[in-house]
Image (tube, grey):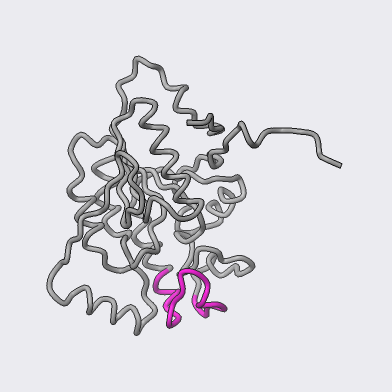
């Protein structure tokens, strides 16, 4: 494993005498884009440091040790189909995820920390409602790989400022993850109502994202730590500009 720069959060800084935390990380999948690489490399580094850890994903694509796929839970017959129909009709987003809820409810008692990554994508694999009960039982960390938790539907609001005041009248429903109808105000208010009851700590990859969180009515009550994404310092390091 190459050396990585984790800025303020270096696992090697933890005293060797300390009993290793049992850590469960949850993400949409193990391979894909940058967010997947961050979650996977973090998991690998934790394993190298001797932490009992698991990475649980909605879609497992690789064969890395310690990575598991979320067990499928059907839920009451027909309910999943009904909720999806209502979401399409109203513009609701990720209202019901029985497999995710069951996973959080059944985490082993020895788990001492739950680290959540992206909670959107992969066919509505997650729902934020179970985070209320989870955060009252186990310390929770959420890493923001984008701004989805701050908005009424999109991960990248770009020039749109409406996430600061409640969304609604969305200028671009096609932005990922897209919506068929404008339910952004209801989605935004749902996040505000639920996440106000969640206890946890936010990890963001840059000071800029931390500044966006500070402007968010949804998340600004939670403590934030800036931890830049891991970088292979053998390939990327300070150097003079090449003329």
- Magenta segment, prevailing SS (helix, strand or loop): loop
Residue 26 place in picture, x, y as percent: 33, 48
Q: Quadrant of residue 63?
A: top left
Instruction: Between residue 54 and residue 153, name the one nearer to us.
Output: 54
Question: Going 53% across and 29% down the picture, which residue do you hit?
Answer: 3
In this view of the protein, which residue sits in the foreground, 102 or 67? 67
Q: Nearer the viewer, residue 12 or 240?
A: 240
Task: Please state the extent of the stretch shown in magenta in the rendering.
Answer: 168-187
Q: Residue furthest bottom?
A: 89
At 34% from the left and 84% from the top, the residue drawn is 89
Report the residue at 87% width, 42% height from top. 243
State the image coordinates of residue 149 (x, y, percent, origin top left): 45, 59
Residue 149 within the magenta-colored segment of the rendering = no
Left/right of residue 70 with respect to residue 194 in the rendered view = left
In this view, 166 is above or below 90: above
Q: Quadrant of residue 120?
A: bottom left
Q: Which residue does the image show at 53% across and 66% down from the upper left?
A: 163
Rendered location of residue 81, percent (x, y):
23, 77
The mark tally for this picture is: 0
């Amino acid at each position: 494993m190459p050396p990585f720069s984790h800025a303020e959060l270096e696992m090697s800084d933890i005293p060797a005498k300390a009993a290793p935390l049992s850590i469960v990380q949850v993400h949409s999948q193990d391979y894909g884009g940058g967010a997947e690489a961050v979650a996977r490399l973090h998991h690998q580094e934790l394993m190298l440091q001797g932490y009992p850890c698991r990475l649980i994903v909605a879609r497992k694509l690789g064969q890395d040790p310690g990575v598991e796929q979320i067990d499928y839970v059907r839920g009451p017959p027909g309910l999943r189909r009904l909720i999806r129909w209502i979401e399409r009709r109203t513009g609701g987003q990720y209202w019901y995820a029985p497999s995710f809820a069951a996973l959080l409810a059944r985490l082993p008692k020895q788990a001492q920390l739950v680290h959540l990554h992206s909670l959107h994508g992969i066919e509505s694999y997650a729902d934020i409602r179970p985070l209320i009960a989870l955060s009252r039982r186990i310390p929770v960390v959420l890493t923001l790989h984008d701004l989805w938790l701050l908005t009424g539907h999109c991960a990248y609001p770009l020039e749109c400022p409406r996430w600061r005041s409640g969304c609604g009248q969305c200028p671009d429903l096609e932005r990922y993850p897209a919506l068929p109808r404008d339910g952004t105000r209801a989605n935004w208010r749902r996040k505000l109502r639920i996440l106000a009851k969640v206890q946890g700590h936010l990890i963001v990859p840059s000071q800029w994202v931390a500044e966006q969180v500070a402007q968010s009515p949804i998340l600004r009550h939670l403590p934030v730590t800036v931890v830049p994404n891991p970088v292979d310092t053998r390939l990327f390091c300070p150097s003079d500009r090449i003329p």
